[in-house]
Amino acid sequence: MDDIRVACYSGYRGEQTPKRFWLSERCIEVVRVIDSWLAPDHRYFKVQGDDGGRYILRHDPFAQRWSLTFFDQT
């Protein structure tokens, strides 16, 4: 799913960390960031939502665009 809306926390080094995101009109609060990693052109965040789902969010810093690359509801 491309072009999701993400609200971020900017740390002291200016790094953006997602704190909530919207899938259509549904807002999901990030309970915790499970992992994060850098790729050459993107930054990835594996997060747990307040709905119990696990998501991987991808950020393209050049285009300032977010996308959902993975979802698991366990």
Image (tube, rainbow, N blue to C red):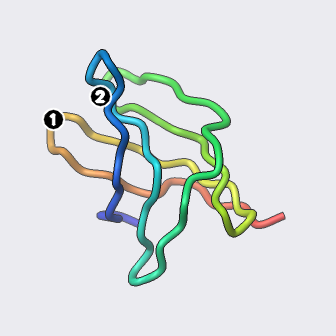
Q: Amino acid at mark 2?
A: Asp
User: Which residue corresponds to the image point at 67% horizontal and 51% vertical from the top-left?
Assistant: 48
Indicate the quadrant containing the N terminus: top left, top right, bottom left or bottom right. Answer: bottom left
The reply to whether discs 2 and 1 touch (Cβ–Cβ < 8 Å) is yes
User: Which residue corresponds to the image point at 53% horizontal and 67% vertical from the top-left?
Assistant: 28
Q: CA distance from mark 2 to mark 1?
A: 8 Å
User: Which residue corresponds to the image point at 32% horizontal and 18% vertical from the top-left?
Assistant: 12
Front-most of 22 and 56? 22
Q: Amino acid at mark 1?
A: Phe
Q: Which mark is residue 51?
A: none
Front-most of 11 and 4? 11
Look at mark 1 in the image and give the residue it sits on.
62
- Left or right: residue 22 versus residue 37 is left
> Residue 69: horizontal and vertical position, in percent?
50, 54
- Left or right: residue 38 versus residue 73 is left
Q: Nearer the viewer, mark 2 or mark 1?
A: 1
How many numbered badges does the structure rendering display? Answer: 2
> Residue 46: horizontal and vertical position, in percent?
60, 41
Q: Secondary structure at mark 1?
A: loop
Residue 6 quadrant: bottom left
Residue furthest to the left in view is 63
Indicate the quadrant containing the C terminus: top left, top right, bottom left or bottom right. Answer: bottom right
Q: Which mark is residue 41?
A: 2
Above or below — where is 21 with respect to 38? below
Q: Secondary structure at mark 2?
A: loop
